[in-house]
Image (cartoon, rainbow, N blue to C red):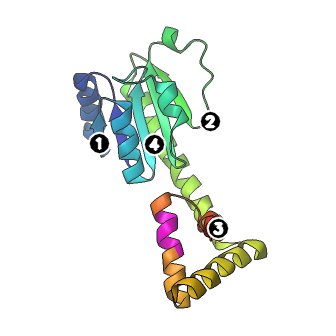
Amino acid sequence: MQNIIIAFAKQEDAQTFKSILVRSGLDVTTVCTSGAQALSAMEDLGSGVIICGYRLTDMIFSELAESLPKFFEMLVIASPGKMDGFGLPENVMFLPSPVKRSDLIATINIMSEGVARLRKKHKENKRGRSPEQKKLIDQAKALLMERHNMTEPEAHKYLQKCSMDSGTDIVETAEMILTMM
């Protein structure tokens, strides 16, 4: 099941959408009123769909869209007039308000499938590393083993943990370690 975040400036609007989704069999992970709360929730969850209005208490949707994590997609629900002049990025969709329940559910399901496909594709790409990428990882592990008296499994676990903590690929983490040391 995909994570769903609802973010609207008015708590009542957010609760209305939550109620619609829950009655339709979808689980809502978090309800927020500000972009900062939504960003924090997205960082904690890692992937999913955020449903928001045009304006939150601290930013408009386009500012939030610029900070969307890699495995999140955004659904903006707003009056069509407010959306004039906004070019939407690939990971942002728009539904005009008032929105039909069936359109809302279908759109969320499509977006959730897209996020799941993206995560699966990313996972498959991680498994098939190039020889250059493997060499970078091995060099970073060797450096960690030499400088910090780690075993190879300890160095690998350290790379993985740093990668997860920073939200970067293990190859990027290895590059950072090699650059810093």
User: Disc 3 residue type?
Assistant: Val
Between 67 and 95, the residue placed more toward the observer is 67
SS of the residue under disc 2: loop
Label 3 sits on residue: 171
Number of marks in the image? Answer: 4
Q: Would you place residue 38 above or below residue 130 in this image? A: above
Label 4 sits on residue: 109
Please indicate whether residue 130 sits to the left or right of residue 156 in the image. right
* Separation (CA) of disc 2 from disc 1: 23 Å
**First to last magenta residue range:** 159-164
| Label whose residue precedes the other's in the sequence (4 or 3) | 4
Please tell me which residue is depicted at 33% across the width and 30% down the height of the picture: 34
Q: How dense is the environment of label 2, judged by Cα within 10 Å: few (below 14), some, or many (20 and up)?
A: few
Q: Position of residue 51 (x, y in %)?
A: 40, 33
Q: Which label lies toward us, 1 or 4? A: 1
User: Disc 2 residue type?
Assistant: Glu
Check contact, mark 4 vs mark 2: CB within 8 A: no
| Label whose residue precedes the other's in the sequence (2 or 1) | 1
* Separation (CA) of disc 4 from disc 2: 16 Å
Label 2 sits on residue: 90
* Separation (CA) of disc 4 from disc 3: 32 Å
User: Disc 4 residue type?
Assistant: Asn
Q: Quadrant of the C terminus?
A: bottom right
Q: Which label lies toward us, 1 or 3? A: 3
Does any portion of residue 28 appear in the rendered image? no
Does any portion of residue 144 appear in the rendered image? yes
